Image (cartoon, rainbow, N blue to C red):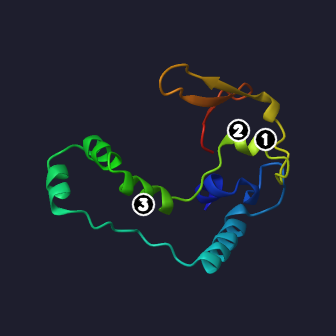
Amino acid sequence: YVNYFNYTNPDELCFSWVPGKNTKKILALKFEQEVYKKGLQYLQVLHLPNELINKCFSKTYMEVMQTLCENAELVLLFSACKPKRVTVRDYLNNSSRKHPLIGMQHVIECVCVGAGEMRHYLCTLCCLTIANRM
């Protein structure tokens, strides 16, 4: 439950400074409400042409993903079914967020300059890294 709300709506999470709450029960109830509103989400199966399946059959995982990403229609289908994720930066810039995130002044952004421009965040108190996606 925590990972789902981490990615989709961090405001639903109860942080450590909120005492006396059983987060597992709270998140399970909220997750059930999400399922009730949106319905069950099933694994989507894409019907691929036989020549594309044969082309991917003997390739490694990375080569298959690269081949599938070359097809613009498949990329649109994959992106349409993925839940929208919230980045740390977007959450910090959101003035209407529910939690003030005490201690966020200790989190710094690290950017690796280059083609991919990879980013992550570092907590200067506990020396843990946080991925760009929460």
Q: Please tell me the numbered disc located at residue 77.
A: 3
Identify residue type, mark 1.
Answer: Asn
Give neighbour class at mark 2: few <14, some 14-19, many 20+ (Cα, 10 Å).
few
For the residues marked 3 and 2, what is the alpha-carbon distance in whole angstroms? 26 Å
Q: Are marks 3 and 2 in contact (CB under 8 Å)?
A: no
Q: Residue at x 69, y 73 (%)?
A: 29
- Could you tell me how far apart the alpha carbons at marks 2 and 1 are, in whole angstroms? 6 Å
In the rendered image of this protein, does residue 102 appear above or below residue 79? above
Dot 1 alpha-carbon crowd within 10 angstroms: few under 14, some 14 to 19, many 20 or more: few
* Relative vertical location of residue 76 with respect to residue 38 in this rendering, above or below: above
Compare residues 99 and 72 and report the one nearer the observer.
Answer: 72
Helix, strand or loop for disc 2: helix
Quadrant that contains the N terminus: bottom right
The residue at the point 64 percent across, 53 percent down is: 6
Pick the front one: 117 or 120: 117
Residue under numbered circle 2:
89
In depth, the one of 75 and 34 nearer the eye is 75
Q: Are marks 2 and 1 in contact (CB under 8 Å)?
A: yes
Q: Secondary structure at mark 1?
A: helix
Q: Quadrant of residue 84?
A: bottom right
Rendered position, 58 above or below 109: below
Expressed as whole percent of the image width and height from the top left, the position of residue 75 reads 40, 53
From the viewer's perspective, is residue 134 above or below residue 27? above
20 to the left or right of 119: right
Q: Is residue 111 left or right of residue 115?
A: right
Q: Is residue 51 left or right of residue 6?
A: left
Q: According to the image, label 1 marks what residue?
A: 93
Circle 2: residue type: Arg
The spot of residue 59 in percent (x, y) is 18, 44
Amino acid type, callout 3: Leu
